[in-house]
Image (cartoon, rainbow, N blue to C red):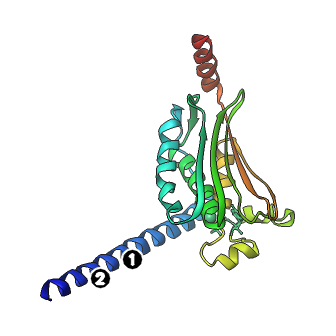
Amino acid sequence: MAHCQESLSVTGKTRRLKKANSSGKHLLSLINDVLDVAKIQAGMMQLFVENGADLAPEIKTVADTIRPAFNGKDVQFFEDVDASLPKLSVDRRRVRQILLNLLSNAVKFTQKGSVTLSVKGREQDVLMAVIDTGPGIGSADQNLIFEPFKQTDTGLRQGSGTGLGLYISRQLAEAHGGKLWVESEVGQGTAFYLSLPFKKGDTENHTSEKASAA
Ligand SMILES: Nc1ncnc2c1ncn2[C@@H]1O[C@H](COP(=O)(O)OP(=O)(O)O)[C@@H](O)[C@H]1O
Ligand SMILES: [Mg+2]
């Protein structure tokens, strides 16, 4: 009996610790978002760009981070990532942040079907996409969602969220000289695209890698 009470209280403590831990993480991410918005609006957002960064480990980290969010959901997670990705001059942490924002939205809003993370090297850029089979976003809302604090009715009903993630993500994409946009139809799902262009040195790397592979 004593043993039983003890193990119950350990379970209870574990549950409380887990809850405290996840509340802490949630608060930290809220604070970070608010700080990012303040930095952007003060013109103080600084990128730490690494020349010729290897994207592959970043994509793997992002996929590993989001995968547990699919547990217990009737939604499959697909990865469609080029086996060999060209090097790109980016702030790796910020690229991770954009992809995690897009993927966490996709998991949050999709109840059935799939979420796909796709990453492709092209001539001028690396094109990343997060495609889901969720509720979709009406054309009237497709500009609004990139404004700070703006959410669609679906987003508001969902109850969690602040409407900051896409605003920050687009600003970060543009700070890289890139683009972030959405293509969607209500009831058909949503695709967010992130295009990050090659800088001069990257293109040289890119073509010389291609040339040496040929
Ligand atoms: N994959 C998606 N499917 C449907 N709606 C989406 C999706 N991603 C974003 N949205 C809409 O865009 C809004 C803004 O997204 P975001 O800026 O990340 O804020 P948050 O996630 O805090 O609500 C969401 O509240 C939701 O209305
Ligand atoms: Mg979000």
Q: Do we see residue 150 in this rendering?
A: yes
Q: Percent from the top left, x then y, of residue 67? A: 50, 55
Residue under the point 47% across and 59% down: 68
Quadrant placement of the C terminus: top right
Q: Quadrant of ligand 2?
A: bottom right
Residue under the point 65% across and 25% down: 200
Secondary structure beneath disc 2?
helix
Mark 2: few/some/many CA within 10 Å (<14, 14-19, 20+): few
Task: Identify residue type, mark 2.
Answer: Gly
Residue under the point 62% across and 72% down: 162
Secondary structure beneath disc 1?
helix
* Residue that mark 2 sits on: 12
Task: Identify residue type, mark 1.
Answer: Lys
Judging depth in this view, the residue of 15 and 99 nearest the camera is 15
Q: In which quarter of the image is residue 145?
A: bottom right
Q: Do we see residue 165 in this rendering?
A: no
Q: In which quarter of the image is residue 105?
A: bottom right
Whether residue 64 sits left or right of residue 163 in the image: it is: left
* Residue that mark 1 sits on: 19
Q: Is 80 situated above or below 155?
A: above
Q: Percent from the top left, x then y, of residue 151? A: 72, 71
Quadrant placement of the N terminus: bottom left
Whether residue 42 sits left or right of residue 136 in the image: it is: left
Q: Is 10 situated above or below 98?
A: below
Judging depth in this view, the residue of 208 and 76 nearest the camera is 76
